[in-house]
Image: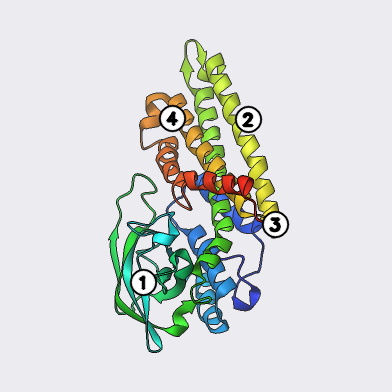
């Protein structure tokens, strides 16, 4: 079930994104946000597949497929989230090696990871265009895992800080060409944003089913809550919103399977579907009344877990900026 898109020659089954999408959706339906399967399988593994040397692919991908190794992506920093050009982690060339110094934060799978892809500046004078990617492995001298972070939601998910203190790595640890990390990341972001969007819609679908069942069973004013017009209209709005989003995200999945999903469309899916996820979760809590505020009800967990979806993978405000640029300043 892990890394289904990895080619067969490296231990995977070489499937397209429609198959891991089933995993994204089923995890969301069940509310199991703890395991960072999507990060491991559908964000980290594609970087190795698409930009790794043959040696890197032969050594790392089979371990990701089997689950022997857990993968993470070290991009976000305390002062650099969506602003890729502001990354402070640096990799300085020293003979045949690079010496890496810096830190990362909010890293999914960070505490448990055996391998992490780290974004670091190899040319500090070029902004985003001076960033390179490095493969860092657990146990390397100078690689320190910080605290597991105490989050609002997704409490079972491993999220931590990472530190690099005079971490010396060979040139063979670089992933992809030097100073081309930004381009690698831009190529991979549509899939990352698509999976976030799909998980958002699936979570909204789960909340709708829970809310529908609760309001149909809950008795008030001589009948079920769902028989009240104000409640049935809320359910109708939720159902319609979700169906529209599902049609769009399924279209995006089909486009991506055919290698036709562009950055602007993926950004649309990410911002629209995660905003919808939070909206549906909010309405679900409201229709559950006081019980929606209780941890033992899944709708409460969906509510707090939804909040970060509009932040990571590129804040939704950035998604709108990217969409706007594609409209007002399309590439020639």
Q: Using the image as rendered, state which of residue 34 and residue 241 is in the foreground.
A: 241
Q: Using the image as rendered, state which of residue 251 and residue 15 is in the foreground.
A: 251
Q: Mark 1 points at which residue?
A: 90
Residue 286 location (% of width, % of height) = 44, 26
Sequence-first disc among 2 and 3: 2
Q: Which of marks 2 and 1 is in front?
A: 1
Left or right of residue 35, residue 216 in this image? right
Instruction: Calculate the distance from the C-alpha at mark 2 to the C-alpha at mark 4.
Output: 18 Å
Sequence-first disc among 2 and 4: 2
| Total numbered labels placed on residues in the image | 4
Relative to residue 316, is residue 131 depicted above or below? below
Is residue 312 at all visible to an observer of this figure?
yes
Residue 285: assigned label: 4
Picture quadrant of residue 145: bottom left
Determine the residue positioned at 52% across, 46% down: 321
For mark 1, does the 10 Å Cα neighbourhood hold few (<14), some (14 to 19), or many (20 or more) residues? Answer: many
Residue 172: assigned label: none
Relative to residue 284, is residue 248 depicted above or below? below
Residue 243 location (% of width, % of height) = 64, 35
Determine the residue positioned at 49% across, 44% down: 316
Residue 240: assigned label: 2
Q: What element carries label 1?
A: strand
Q: Mark 3 points at which residue?
A: 260
Q: Is mark 3 on a helix, strand or loop?
A: loop
Sequence-first disc among 3 and 4: 3
Instruction: Calculate the distance from the C-alpha at mark 3 to the C-alpha at mark 4.
Output: 37 Å
């Amino acid at each position: 079930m892990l890394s289904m898109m990895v080619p067969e020659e490296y231990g995977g089954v070489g499937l397209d994104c429609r198959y891991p999408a089933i995993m994204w959706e089923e995890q969301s339906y069940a509310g199991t946000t703890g395991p960072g399967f999507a990060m491991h399988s559908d964000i980290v593994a594609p970087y190795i597949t698409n930009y790794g040397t043959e040696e890197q692919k032969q050594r790392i991908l089979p371990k990701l497929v089997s689950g022997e190794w857990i993968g993470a992506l070290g991009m976000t920093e305390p002062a650099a989230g969506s602003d890729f050009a502001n990354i402070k982690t640096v990799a300085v060339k020293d003979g045949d090696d690079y010496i890496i110094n810096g830190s990362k934060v909010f890293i999914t799978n960070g505490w448990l990871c055996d391998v992490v892809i780290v974004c670091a500046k190899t040319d500090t004078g070029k902004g985003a265009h001076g960033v390179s990617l490095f493969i860092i492995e657990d146990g390397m001298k100078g690689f320190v895992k910080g605290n597991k972070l105490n989050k609002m939601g997704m409490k079972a998910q491993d999220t931590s800080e990472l530190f690099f203190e005079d971490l010396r790595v060979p040139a063979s640890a670089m992933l992809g060409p030097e100073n081309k990390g930004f381009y690698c990341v831009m190529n991979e972001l549509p899939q990352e944003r698509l999976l976030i969007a799909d998980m958002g819609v699936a979570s909204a679908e789960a909340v709708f089913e829970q809310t529908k069942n609760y309001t149909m069973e809950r008795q008030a004013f001589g009948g079920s809550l769902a028989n009240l017009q104000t409640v049935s209209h809320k359910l109708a709005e939720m159902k319609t919103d979700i169906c529209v989003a599902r049609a769009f995200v399924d279209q995006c999945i089909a486009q991506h399977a055919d290698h036709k999903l562009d950055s602007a469309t993926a950004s649309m899916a990410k911002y629209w579907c995660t905003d919808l996820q939070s909206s549906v979760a909010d309405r679900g809590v409201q229709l559950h009344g006081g019980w929606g505020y209780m941890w033992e009800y899944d709708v409460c967990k969906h509510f707090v877990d939804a909040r970060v979806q509009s932040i990571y993978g590129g804040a939704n405000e950035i998604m709108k900026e990217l969409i706007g640029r594609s409209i007002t300043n399309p590439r020639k």
